[in-house]
Amino acid sequence: MIINGPGISYTEPDIGSEFVPELPDNPRPSIVALCKHCTNRILGKDELLPYEYWSFAEAATDEQADMLVRLKVRVPYTLEAAAKATGIPPEKLEPMLDEVSYVGLLEYNWENPQHEKQWVLPMLVPGSAEFLNMRWSQLEEHPVFAKFFEQASKGPLSRATPLVPPGGAGIGMHVIPVERAIEHEDQSISIEHIKHWLDKYDGKYAASACSCRMSRQRMGEGCGDDFNDWCIAVGDMADYVVETNRGRYITREEALEIFQRAEDNGFVHQITNIDGENKIFAICNCNVNVCYALRTSQLFNTPNLSRSAYVAHTEADKCVACGRCVEVCPAGAVKLGQKLCSKATGKVPEYPRQELPDAVKWGPEKWSPNYRNDNRVETHEAGTAPCKTACPAHIAVQGYLKLAAQGRYDEALALIKRENPLPAVCGRICNRRCEDACTRGRVDAAVAIDEVKKFIAQRDLDAATRYIPPVVTPTRAGGFDQKVAIIGAGPAGLSCAFYLAEKGYKPVVFEKMPRPGGMLTYGIPSFKLEKDVIEAEVEVIREMGAEFRYGVEVGRDVTLAELREQGFAAFYIAIGCQGGRLPGVDGQDAKGVWTAVDFLAEYTDQSAGAAPAMGRTVVVGGGNVAIDAARVAARTQAPEVTMLCLESAEEMPASDEEVAEAREDGVDIRCGWGPKEVLANEAGAVRGIVLKRCTRVFGDDGRFAPEYDEGDLVTIECDQVVFAIGQSIEWGNLLEGSAVELGRGQGAVADPQTYQTAEPDIFVGGDVYTGPKFAIDAIAAGHEAAVSIHRFVQHGTLTIGRNQRKYVELNKDDADLSSYDTAQREVPAAKDAAAAKATPFREYVETLTEEQVRAETARCLGCGASIVDPNKCIGCGLCTTKCAFDAIHLRRERPECSVMVKSENKVPALLKYAAKRQAKIMFGRKR
């Protein structure tokens, strides 16, 4: 019985052990007797375990315990029968029965011909361990109840789980599929439909708190869900939970709304499975990250304990590897793979299946104690579509290309916003790592992914067609009241605000500048990204419920401490790298010397008025920021614009496309030079710059360590110098009094997965954490921060069960691409030279036409596909609710899983299956 410690941990972390004292030297005899009487462990029934002892000790007096011991488990007693069994007069007994029912050691119903109230001493699970955990005030006072439930739902089954036949044999809970996934399934039977149970118990429903969610939260492993209202008691159990202050009556319509909200959130429907054919007492909506019933099958890798009669299957020709089914699958049965054939075999790769305990010996070495994280790994080791893998936000590129090809633009935009709330922005300025990785590039040229995204996202620029995502929140309250402050309205802050609003929060964004966007607004020229594009996408976030306060600098106008006093529960700092850097050379303080950050903030948006006069300009730097500064100078009619960088043309960090566009604007780019001195005239203004030849940029270790030939100098006459050699973080007084630590480059130190700092309620992200990167990196960080902040303010774990974001690229070298014809990549039109010159700060690159989009999306090779492991599938059907392509369906392949057995008959059912299984093990029989 004892597998990992004294009957406590069973290979999982021993959460909640601090709530369980050691057994006393002289245990109360009545409580010891109650433990032995109620315990339903198959083995080791006489073993007195501390969490059981202390739970019963805190739940019952000695008199109550003595009374309960005289009642048989799961046998109904009317008051008269109970009085006879216990020897206690009815007038004294009835209030005792009601008192222990309120606590949760008894339940009651009226299931007899006379419809007379009768009390039942339940088993531990489902039963008293759950009922003790169904009232938060009781858990707060008696946290040992939480440990009791966590262990009672696991320990008794640690050795029995491989012996459980399909259908569960009257043990635990049973998955019931999403109704619409099987509503037209001719082979289904009544008990597999939610509507059957609603009809059977018509008018007798009560919404109660989820004991699993409460128990886990009390022990510090909550999942962020509001625990109220997720479990629907039916029949007499509805009366019990209402009368004992565990729930409230609801209508059929409310029950259906709860089921729909559960499916939206990815929760699994389960019914109780201990009363035999066609009888249940509850329908639960379970989150696998906390659910003990699902935990039993997932931890022990024994799906018979929970799965329905259905198995999911994908249709490869329809599947586009968007990953929505993968994200929602509670069992990790669906993962992303590929549908390209291998050069070596000429076939699509075969994928491994989870081993099952039906024909092999099974023990702790077969278990999966880390299942909550392992089930959230999205990709098979062999890899999936490179576009989704390469994108920092892992956008479902293949999916939105397919939707666009079908003209389903609203759905395409919705799919993009699952991972990127700023698609119109990214369609213009993204560095397109998805295209760099695109398999199509091995045939001719990569799919113009960002151009298609730009076309789709044009809908966001018009209030009549923009997409406002619905709020999908794991609470029936309509949203969450906790206040979250986001400091900085750049891409990371906007992303965090978007995903918090989508979860049901009303985040407040503090921005010291008068407009949102951060460096999107103040660092990217309008001819690449017009400001109304940013404003339009910010308006979507505002309409979702976020509040924006401009002109407010946290640390100057209001402090973190003051915001805490105002009720803010968490902070996301995403102020970016808003300062520039100077090289430390003589003359850098001359009039006319700029950092690129300041220069772009001053001159990047000249679309509304005449461009200022600008003299001869030298830009020092080799990255895209330097390109932007040089192009701005050129478009403000500077007579000469020279850009100088340390790197060779091959080493320049700026993209080839950016370099070509700068040259088209007239920028003279010279490689291999670094600044030595800025020359000033008598008035202290710039008159030139001296440069020295750079002979080497990087050291042998690959780190930046430039070397120069000090004898090889050149002087360029100019009127202003712009240094684009790096950015810095300007903290001001923002962190005053906080425990946030700063590391390299004065960036905030935080956990790389959760972004939580040493100050628990402060999270960081974007450039302030990573240093200068791209907008899509900041967007991805903001999304993950929103996940962490939600869990934090809801007192959950920040790490367990969250999407692991582990994507692997398929092996393009092994992909057989010989059957694909070449097709020219579509290129968007651009303004002619005269028009571009007349409006130099307006966007000059047009959007693809609808015809071009159809042609371009047809070039996608459709590399990826979702792969279902039928051995892991529990048949919940949630995957079918998320697929926009009708590519995944349930099939009724395991009808034996719908056999319902009474708990009292579990031993014969277990023994029959165990004998059959043992024969398979001994003689190698196959199914």
Image (cartoon, rainbow, N blue to C red):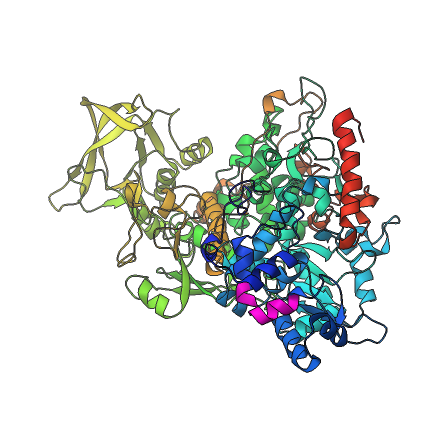
* Residue at the spot 64% in from the left edge and 47% down from the top edge: 296
Query: From the viewer's perspective, is residue 601 above or below residue 583?
Result: below
- Can residue 540 be seen in the rendering of this structure? no
- Farthest top residue? 344
The answer to whether residue 167 is left or right of residue 810 is right
Q: Residue 826's quadrant in the figure?
A: top right
> Is residue 709 located in the magenta-colored stretch of the structure?
no
Seen in the image, is 366 located left or right of residue 510? right
Q: Camera-side residue: 376 or 839?
A: 376
On-image quarter of the C terminus:
top right
Specify whether 397 is left or right of 306.
left
Locate residue 465, reporting x and y percent.
63, 58
Residue at the image position 19 percent from the left and 47 percent from the top:
591
Residue 57 seen in this snapshot: yes
Q: Whole-percent x and y of residue 387?
A: 58, 35
Region of the chain picked out in magenta, as a range: 57-68
Residue 832 position, x and y percent, is 52, 41
The part of the image, by quadrant, that contains residue 467 is bottom right
Count the marks: how many? 0
| Most common secondary structure along the magenta stretch | helix
For image coordinates 36% across by 59% down, the residue present is 513
* Residue sitting at the far bottom: 91
Image location (x, y in percent) of residue 556: 28, 63
**Figure check: 93 above or below 290:** below
